[in-house]
Structure formats: C-alpha cells, structure tokens
Amino acid sequence: MVEREVEAVLNELVRRANESTRRLRALEERSSLIEMRVSSLQDTVLKFSEDKRLENEKLIQKMIEIDNNILRIDNELSRINKNMEKVAKRTELKEVENMMSFFNPLKTNFVTKEDVERIIEEKMR
C-alpha cells in the first residue's frame, strides 16, 4: 500500500514536472517571439530614422538653394532699380516727343530768309 502511495506521489510529481516543463517551453517560445518582434521593430525604426535624416538633409540643401536664389534675385532687383533711376520716365519721354514735334520742319511752318526779306519789302512799300 505504501508503495502505491509512493508511486502515486511520484506519478503526480512527474506529471507536475512535465506540466511545468511544458509551460516553461511555451513561455520561452513567447519570449523568443517577443524578442524577434522587438528586433524587427528596432530595425524598422532605425531604417525610418535614417530615411528621415536623409530627407532632412535634402530639405536643408533645398532651403539653402532657395535662400541663395532669393539673395541673387534681391541683388538683381537692386541692380535693376539703380538702372531704372537712369532711365527716362514716360512723362519725360512725352515732353521730349512734344519738343521734337514742335521743332520738326515737316510739321511746322518755318520762314526762310528770303521769305522774311520779301515780307519786309512788301511792308516797306
């Protein structure tokens, strides 16, 4: 009888040990899966970070290029403004045009020397 009880206790201990071993294996598998997922996430985050770093570098380069273009345009506008001060304005051109039309011999009636002498002779008679 004692042997049966001892055998039953031993069987129960073996069963519990087997159950604990099975649970331990299941926990190890879950732990391994979690480690793989964490590693995969770390790789993804590192790749994402590198991609964003490269994007930021490109954006910075574009911003520097845009800044240089703005400076170049600003300098060109300053040069154009200085040149515009030297250029005649529309009103000044209109004034010169009016003066030219006033002194244009084809449009105005000028008197020649002979005409003046003839008019003076006619008035003296």
Image: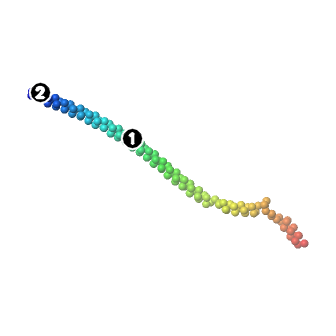
Q: Is residue 51 left or right of residue 24?
A: right
**Residue 54 falls in which quadrant of the image?**
top left
Residue matched to label 2: 4
Residue 64 is marked as none
| Image coords of residue 39 (percent x, y) | 33, 38
Can you name the residue that lies furthest to the bottom here? 124
The amino acid type of the residue labelled 2 equals Arg
The amino acid type of the residue labelled 1 equals Lys
Residue name at image x 43 percent, y 46 percent: 56
Residue name at image x 31 percent, y 36 percent: 33
42 in relation to 100, above or below: above
- Contact between labelled residues 1 and 2, with CB atoms less than 8 Å apart: no
Residue 47 is marked as 1
In front here: 26 or 38? 26
Looking at the rendered image, the quarter that the N terminus falls into is: top left
Can you name the residue that lies furthest to the front here? 1
Dot 2: few (<14), some (14–19), or many (≥20) neighbours within 10 Å?
few
| Image coords of residue 94 (percent x, y) | 69, 61
**Residue 75 falls in which quadrant of the image?**
bottom right
18 in relation to 91, above or below: above
Residue name at image x 56 percent, y 56 percent: 77
Mark 2 and mark 1: span between their CA atoms?
A: 64 Å
Total count of labels = 2
Check disc 1 and report its element: helix, strand or loop.
helix
39 in relation to 88, above or below: above
**Residue 92 falls in which quadrant of the image?**
bottom right
Dot 1: few (<14), some (14–19), or many (≥20) neighbours within 10 Å?
few
In front here: 52 or 66? 52
Looking at the rendered image, the quarter that the C terminus falls into is: bottom right
Structure colour scheme: rainbow
Residue name at image x 86 percent, y 70 percent: 120
